[in-house]
Amino acid sequence: MHEAAAIPSWVLLAYLVAGVCFIMALRGLSSPESSRRGNRMGIIGMTIAVATTLATHEIATLWEIAIAILIGGGVGLVIARRIQMTAMPQLVAAFHSLVGMAAVLVGAAAYLNPGAFGILGPDGIHQVSRIEMGLGVAIGAITFSGSVIAFLKLNGNMSGKPIILPLRHVINLGTLVAILGLIAYFTQDQAPWIFWTVTALSFAIGFLLIIPIGGADMPVVISMLNSYSGWAAAAMGFTLHNSAMIITGALVGSSGAILSYIMCRAMNRSFVSVIAGGFGGDAVAGGDAVAIDRPYKRGSAEDAAFLMSQSDQVIIVPGYGMAVAQAQHALREMADLLKKAGVKVKYAIHPVAGRMPGHMNVLLAEANVPYDEVFELEDINNEFAQTDVAFVIGANDVTNPAAKTDKSSPIYGMPVLDVEKARTVLFVKRSMGGVGYAGVDNELFYRDNTMMLLADAKKMVEEINKALG
């Protein structure tokens, strides 16, 4: 085993402080009320880590570092100012791809110039470093290519439907075994063809793993890729002898894995099935079903305004349709008008509503919805039976009662919001012609206590606000 050069005690202390900041950041991000504080702690920790690394590693001149920061920071600033909140899921996927590619580039640089990284011994690259390097490059490449596919699906450049390849399980398992076998062989022989074959196969399996995953499982994919990016960073931290990267990567990797498991439970999906590209079962094909031609009750903005203004409590259920229409600000205005009329207003959030974990929480926070009015599924589901109106805006699969009754449904067993128990359900939907992202029609549309409000979500809510005003 190789030994890194002696690290000054103040550097270790600085990295320790940065690690504590990262832990506090994750703790803060666990709640909407403390999320801003958590973000600040993360910024402070990363600033300390980056400053310490730059102060102790002569990796480039000050001007080169400044130019790199200006380029990267400038690109990030432009993206941050232009990005719409509805595009946040694909932005997150794009960021994950950059983390993965960074790990691949660092690994390649370490392989091509091991002496500069302190991993070169008399017999070539140290064996331990070869393992670290191989795993880091493999995970990084999988993260990059998988994130690219996720971005294309989320951005609409590729169909959200699963792309099922013949013998995909055999291909995936064979590719994975080949990667692990080559990494093991790499510890004995550091020939270039081994390193670059591992890299190429890892890029390939990233595509193969994500292509069969349908759009309905995208929240799990996003959190899973987040986990992968963390483990890639941790592996590169060992190669670079950087404890801050190891700590940060391990935190991101483990928290992402836990979040992926929580998302799978919320969707009644097998964790292994999703991360293996549907291994062990058929992927859910989104968008193949069509809406059933059945009688339904249609209402107007004036009807909705009257029903809600006469209510004691209204529970608002936001979904991806709200995000697409960018109706969150109009929705908050509607809630404010109802509260002025003496109506109690709450928001019910399903864990997988939207296209990434916490998507609805982010949109509501952007519209300055009070945190104490936002509740998760397990905290509010028992209140629907005592609620006058459930106002569903763009949420389909997460409110579908078939998940509790229809064993043939692809969403059977998924915990859903019990909106059908409310006295009246107002369902905002663009038209009756479409189905949810999971590809199943919602029987809630046709129930006696449901009134369909067919229009663009933002336009409908604005009309309701006029009626309330």
Image (cartoon, helix red, strand yellow):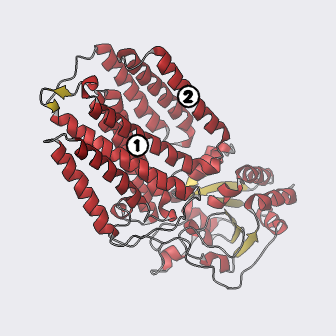
Whether residue 275 is visible to the viewer of this picture, yes or no, is yes
Q: Residue at x 77, y 76 (%)?
A: 298
Q: Are marks 2 and 1 in contact (CB under 8 Å)?
A: no
What amino acid does circle 2 point to? Ile
- Of the pair 44 and 86, the residue shown nearer to us: 86
Q: Quadrant of residue 264?
A: bottom left
- Of the pair 51 and 463, the residue shown nearer to us: 51
Coordinates of residue 125 in the picture (x, y in percent)? 19, 32
The mark that comes first in sequence, 2 or 1, is 2
**The N terminus sits in image quarter:** top left
Q: Residue at x 82, y 65 (%)?
A: 301
Q: CA distance from mark 2 to mark 1?
A: 19 Å
Residue 18 horizontal side relative to residue 94, left or right: left
Q: Which residue is mark 2?
A: 71
- Of the pair 167 and 298, the residue shown nearer to us: 167
Q: In the rendered view, would you say 75 is above or below 390?
A: above
Q: Tell me if mark 1 has few (under 14), some (14-19) or many (20+) residues whose alpha carbon lies within 10 angstroms of its own.
A: many
- Of the pair 226 and 135, the residue shown nearer to us: 135
Coordinates of residue 415 in the picture (x, y in percent)? 48, 66
What amino acid does circle 1 point to? Gly
Q: In the rendered view, would you say 227 is above or below 263?
A: above
